[in-house]
Image (cartoon, rainbow, N blue to C red):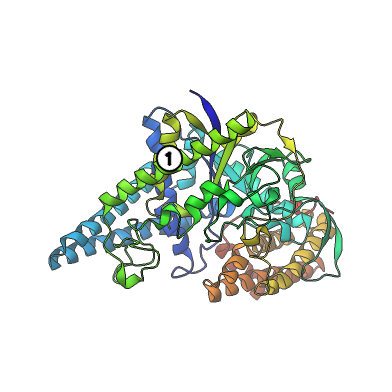
Amino acid sequence: MEVTGRFLFVLHSHIPYVMNHGVWPHGEHWLFEAAAETYLPLLIMLRRFQGESGTPAISIGMTPVLVEQMKSEGFKERFAEFLDYKLNLATKDVALLEESGDTQMAALAGRWRDFYRDSIRTFTDICHGDIIDAFRRLQDEGLVEILTSAATHGYLPLLSRDACVRAQVKTGIHVYEKAFGRKPKGIWMPECAYRPAGEWTNPVMPLETFVRKGVDEILVEEGLEYTVIDSPLLGNANLLGVYSDEELDFSKVKFSRTPYLPYRLSSGLQLFVRDHVTGYQVWSRHHGYPGDPYYLEFHKMKDTSGIKFWRITGTDVDLGGKQPYDPKIAESRIKENAAHFAGLANRLMAEFKERNGHPGVLVAPFDAELFGHWWFEGPQWLYEVLRLLETTDGVVPVTCEEMARVSENAEIIDLPEGSWGENADHSVWLNEKTKWTFRELYPVEQKFVSFVQARREMWQQSGELRGVLIEAAKSLLIAEASDWQFLIHKESALDYVEKRFRQHVGEVARFLGMANVLAAGENLTADDEAFLQQCHRENDCFQDLDLNWWCEDV
């Protein structure tokens, strides 16, 4: 087999902490829908390779907060109820549509009924109620590589203290080791966001300036070896970020360095660079595969069941003009799109090898939830692409870990600050709409870190004080999630998001007040005790945090 290049599929899975914090339209249903429409279909897709020659060679990042939620008893119980609920709705749709004589729609409803029946069987008989453990078994079999991430997807460059960055990373590693039985080697930096070492000025309190470690230094100190970055950080500031949807003329895009090679920072962290050409084929709403007129329309649903029966028809066609979905035509489009993508990957790598005399690497990172949840046909498309790449000469699919083994002599580079967001900077998360969140977050970060470091001997000796501070740490981690700023910027679920953010910041502040009471030798009030127990139940994650994780960067 002639190898012209290597191919890295990296899927990033993440849902913010929503368990016990609302159900619908905002809350637990976000997680349940992603589990039913993305995580279970991906699991089923990967299992198909168990009975076939070759392995899929794919890397999937799972945020610790997602792992914690799906490992919880509340998720196992209520997700099963959700699947039963959706199955009942689909079954009723079948009966009603058959009675009305609409055989086409009845057949589509039958497919959804079968979809939820299969989901229940997968969750019950294959996962035994534990989706994360099912992925662990696939990793143990060599069918997938699982990457870790920061605890709650905190936007690491914008956290105000290195201690908070390290705690996000240490929590992520700890959760990974518990769930997957091994140490992680790779990490998905939330939003591919990076900040080098050097002088840092507080973006909302500019009088505060001090020298900080680079994000990469902390990752390497914690034993992590590689991550993914976006191509604009290699020097092309004009390349549009992942959230843009304009048509690009790639012939005019010039890089100071090629994105088709791995790199390394002086800290030792290996970097795999997102390819903008293949990424555009998937991310673009108007020009990418998910916008194919024959694929399932995400936004139009049956009013009585919330089930989808229509195809996209056209990206500029309003919901009233959507036509019924035809699974057979969609299946043919999946194969055509997969063949186009695999052919494009082979052409790009062949051209690179011809120009440079050696194979390159093409990195295709995506949010996992695109596959299945937003793009119903996505998991099947993934399967077809992986199978094509496995069975044809040219590009060889590899995992990040496999790529790291063959790129130890990668060129050492400096990397500017940035992300994979619009403008390749922090502006999606730090802007006029979101500055207030950092004005509220930074003071509680600083007070929490100062208290934990200054009273270390005291909380090590007092189980009650330590318990209060652990609840504060949990709330702080949740408040640090990048999701709040992203959703505020997109003006999505604003009431819910702003309430949740302020709630968790307020929890940290109250817990610190309780900690001061205990440190003064006084007792907590009955209201404080009740509040402590309520938060312990509602924030049912990271129950075994180690406060020492906030004490290493003094």
Q: Is residue 387 left or right of residue 150?
A: left
Dot 1 amino acid type:
Val
What is the x, y in percent for residue 113? 26, 56
Q: Is residue 105 visible?
A: yes
Q: Is residue 546 left or right of residue 530?
A: right
Quarter of the picture holding the C terminus: bottom right
Q: Residue at x 18, y 66 (%)?
A: 96
What is the x, y in percent for residue 435? 70, 72
Q: Is residue 495 above or below residue 256?
A: below
Total tally of numbered discs in the picture = 1
In which image quadrant can residue 193 be found? Answer: bottom right
In which image quadrant can residue 475 be found? Answer: bottom right
Q: Residue at x 75, y 64 (%)?
A: 445
Please, what secondary structure does the residue beneath circle 1 have? helix
Q: Is residue 234 above or below residue 535?
A: above
| Circle 1 Cα neighbour tier, 10 Å, few/some/many (<14 / 14–19 / ≥20) | many
